[in-house]
Amino acid sequence: MRVLILSQHFVPEVTAARFRIEPFVDALRGSGHEVEVVCAVPNHPEGVIDPRFRGRPLVRQRAPGLAVDYVWVRVAPEKTMRTRLELYGSYAAMAVAVGVAARRPDVVLASSPPLTVGLAGALVAARHRVPWVLDVRDLWPKAAIVLGELSSPRSIAAAERLERWLYRRASLITTVTEPFRRHIAERAPSEARIEVLPNGTTRAWIERGRGRPDRAAIGMPADRFVWAYAGNLGLYHGLDTAMDAAELLGEGYQLHLIGHGPLRDELERRAAELPPGRVRLEGLMSPDAAAERLLAADALLVALRASLDDVVSSKLFDYCALGRPVIVAATGETRRLAEGAALLAAPEDPVAMADAVRTLRDDPELGRRLGERARELAAGYLREAQAQRLVSELEALTSTADSR
């Protein structure tokens, strides 16, 4: 089987999209299938193209059973509606051009958001006359509307029409949560095939969580209770609430934020207004380096906006795999999954978040028990298992197509 995957983000970028697609690629190759990935040149989250990929419309890399095509996209450090649309549109146009010219696949998989990746997948599959799969990592345009990124009635209507069109055209739809599946089912034809393939962690992260690094070696204070977050510093995660909680906690605590994103500058400004040591920010780093810091922390933070009740933060599973106590400030599906394995707090409530941090500082035994339960939760959500399910789905899909 030859599989063509369209994803706006892939290795070496550190994104949720990369960590969902990478196990799919590994499982397909491990099953003897051939994979080609068409992705944007690395640029996220800074909005600056990696120097190794500049100056060329297409950079091709090859490995046994795998071809990766990095295509040029229009990028900008400023994240406005205009710059986002230019990024999404340029990737979709380049992905269609490269995908149409590629050797004929047996199946196309397009991972959204943005919806334009799904549109590119539909067009490429139609050109090659093969089935295609829409992988829905997040609901668009719903999430963009909830977060205030999309407000024009005309734009919303156009995005919703595209969403429904893609659901009608896809041979198979995969998504990450049961609430997402229900949302899609309400908008897709009654005969649409929809499968839930949750996000998860890896065995390597579970094994890594069995030891703790030396704090001094990575610049973390030994005399403060450190609670940490690593990932996108963006609108989804309610990090303004974490900053408020850090201010309430006072001395003896440190909020450690790792990553980059549209709120980075604002978070740095607020951190500078607090007493030294209250908040520490580090930039984007490799998953291994981030894991080392998370392991060294006393507690880990998963936070989502209250309005995102159907979203499951993908970082929940990796955090739990490390066996550190996790604070979950979220509603809906993330809260349901984390119940019993994490300390729950109301989202967007700095007092509740600060109280949760104090509770873990004052009760180390509770933290130890939660860490054990967290690892048990993570073990039930392995990316490798979900990837093998996808392989089976694609094999069945292409077998059915061949029989026709």
Image (tube, rainbow, N blue to C red):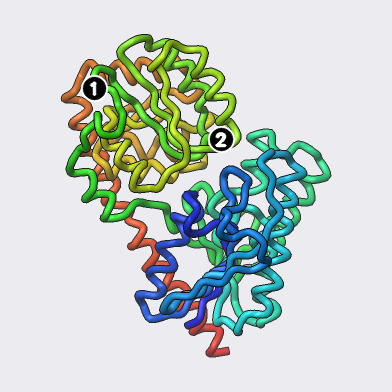
Write down the residue under mark 2.
234
At 54% from the left edge and 88% from the top edge, which residue is drawn? 402
Residue closer to the observer: 142 or 222: 222
Locate residue 165, reporting x and y percent: 71, 62
Disc 1 on helix, strand or loop?
A: loop
Residue found 57% across the figure and 44% down from its top: 45
| Label 1 neighbour load within 10 Å: few <14, some 14-19, many 20+ | few
Q: Residue at x 51, y 74 (%)?
A: 67
Q: Look at mark 1 in the image and give the residue it sits on.
A: 222
Left or right: 139, with 10 as reference point = right
Of 174 and 192, the residue lying toward us: 174
Identify the residue at image location x=32%, y=36%.
293
Residue 304 visible to the viewer: yes
Q: Where's residue 161, x and y in %? A: 75, 55
Q: Position of residue 224 (x, y in %)?
A: 28, 18
Q: Does residue 375 appear to the left or right of 74 in the view shown?
A: left
- Image x and y of residue 328, in percent: 39, 31
Front residue (pair 211, 147):
211
Q: Is residue 216 above or below residue 93?
A: above
Q: Is residue 169 above or below residue 65?
A: above
**What type is the residue that disc 1 sits on?**
Ala
